[in-house]
Amino acid sequence: MEPEIVVRSDLNSVAREAADRFVAIARQSIVAHGKFTLALSGGSTPRALFTLLASSGYQGQIDWEHTLVFWGDERCVPPDHADSNYRMARELLLAWVHIPEGNVHRARGEINPEQAALEYEQTVRREAPASTGIPSFDLILLGIGPDGHTASLFPGTPAIHEQTRLVVANFVPKLGAHRITFTPPLINAAAHVMFLASGADKADVLRAILEGEHKPDLLPAQIVKPASGQLTWLIDRTAAAHLRS
């Protein structure tokens, strides 16, 4: 299935488009199989989406009682650390909606990275539906970095080519640290994968990812190709500025 590329005027418009789609996917998923399995992303772009979903206009549109929340990647820090993806989502979204604590599944970044990854994979397998052997999330949110990374699949790192594990501790040399991340098989098993990108600093890398040669070792976001799901790019005009089509 070809990816859908949607361009909106600015970050706030991207966030509103994402929120509307988020609500629709949540409702469809709960009707279809009784729950909505969701993986959130870190980074700066999702902040506007999280804030909008927590607002009075949106939070009541989602059945949070039947929503299961995960993260596509996490830094190896405690949950109250300023760099924690969990903390950002908790402060901007989860603390404002009526979601049971048992529905929130974070990676334990404060423990040994390898152990955290094994534990998180077990949690994913236990809590998310797996009709084909690999759990299929209803929605995975992703961002991209200026270097083309997504989740914590960074250029030149081994997790890009992982085909067996669903979650790994990926060592990132340029950061000098491990990151806990979903792997390509898990991401590509999702029913919906939604990239959010905004800002002029993403323009060059977006053109390379979407219109350049296939080089996933250099541009890991290119490896995201859902097997039977829908891939959507929601981007603002400044991020789309260098796209030819």
Image (cartoon, rainbow, N blue to C red):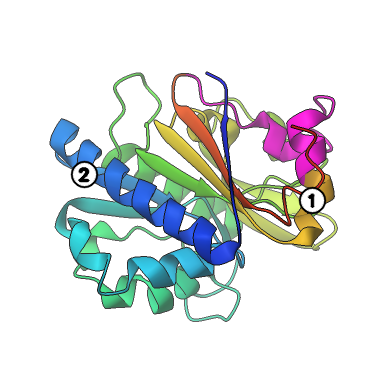
Where does the C terminus fall, quadrant-wise? top right
Which badge, 1 or 2, is on the more N-terminal residue?
A: 2
In magenta, the rendered stretch is 206-227
Residue that mark 1 sits on: 203
Residue mark closest to the camera, 1 vs 2: 1
Q: Secondary structure at mark 1?
A: helix
**Mark 1 → mark 2, Cα distance in angstroms:** 33 Å
Q: Please give the count of numbered marks on the rendered protein.
A: 2
Q: Who's the residue at 72% across and 53% down the image? A: 239
Queried whether the magenta region covers residue 209, the answer comes back as yes
Label 1 is placed on what type of residue?
Ala
Where is residue 199 drawn, in percent x and y?
72, 61
Amino acid at circle 2? Arg
214 above or below 156?
above
Residue at 34% from the left image edge and 55% from the top image edge: 69
Q: What percent of the width, then of the height, locates residue 129? A: 28, 33
Mark 2 crowd level (few <14, some 14–19, many ≥20, 10 Å Cα): some
Viewer-proximal residue among 176 and 16:
16
Furthest residue toward front: 9
